[in-house]
Image (spheres, rainbow, N blue to C red):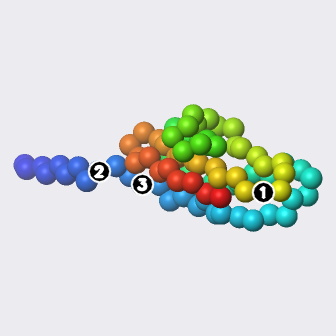
């Protein structure tokens, strides 16, 4: 018997991170990142940073005053390509 094994690269995430404009209502506003099929991906982690190339952690940054804040996010898991991007 002959077997052929091909390695085509890592899996990729399907991420939904929507830039949004919200009316400030006096409460802290935050962004949302969702990953389709996240419940089926073992070890998935979404982390955030307020600086490009900064320290990422699982705490979602908030905005508490009128203005604009750019938030950077990363989605990681074993055997998946890292997905990183900013949204404002």
Residue at screen point 89% across, 50% down: 27
Q: Estimate the spatial distance between the alpha carbons at disc 1 and disc 2, rounded to whole Å.
A: 41 Å
**In the figure, 58 relative to 26: above or below?**
above
Q: Which residue is mark 3?
A: 12
Q: Viewed as shown, does residue 32 lie left or right of 14?
A: right
Residue 81 in the image, given as x and y percentages of width and height: 40, 48
- The label nearer to you, 3 versus 1, is 1
Of pointers 1 and 2, the one earlier in the residue sequence: 2
Q: Tag 1's secondary structure?
A: loop
Q: Is residue 37 visible?
A: no
Which sits in the foreground, 43 or 83?
83
* Rendering quarter of residue 49: top right
Whether residue 55 is situated above or below residue 31 in the rendered picture? above
Q: In which quarter of the view is residue 54 placed?
A: top right
Q: Is residue 21 left or right of residue 88?
A: right
Name the disc covering residue 9, or none: 2
> In x, y percent, where is residue 56?
58, 37
Q: Please state the horizontal and vertical placement of residue 76, each as a whole percent of the image.
A: 49, 43
Q: Which residue is mark 1?
A: 67
Identified at 42% across, 54% down, the residue is 12
How busy is the neighbourhood of tag 2: few (under 14 within 10 Å), some, or many (20 plus)? few
Image quarter where the C terminus lies is bottom right
């Amino acid at each position: 018997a002959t077997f052929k094994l091909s390695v085509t690269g890592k899996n990729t995430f399907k991420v939904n991170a929507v830039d949004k404009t919200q009316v400030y209502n006096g409460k802290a506003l935050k962004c949302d990142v969702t990953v389709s099929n996240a419940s089926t991906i073992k070890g998935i982690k979404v982390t955030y940073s307020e600086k490009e190339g900064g320290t990422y952690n699982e705490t979602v940054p908030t905005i508490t005053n009128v203005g604009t804040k750019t938030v950077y996010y990363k989605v990681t898991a074993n055997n998946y390509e890292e997905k990183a991007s900013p949204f404002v």
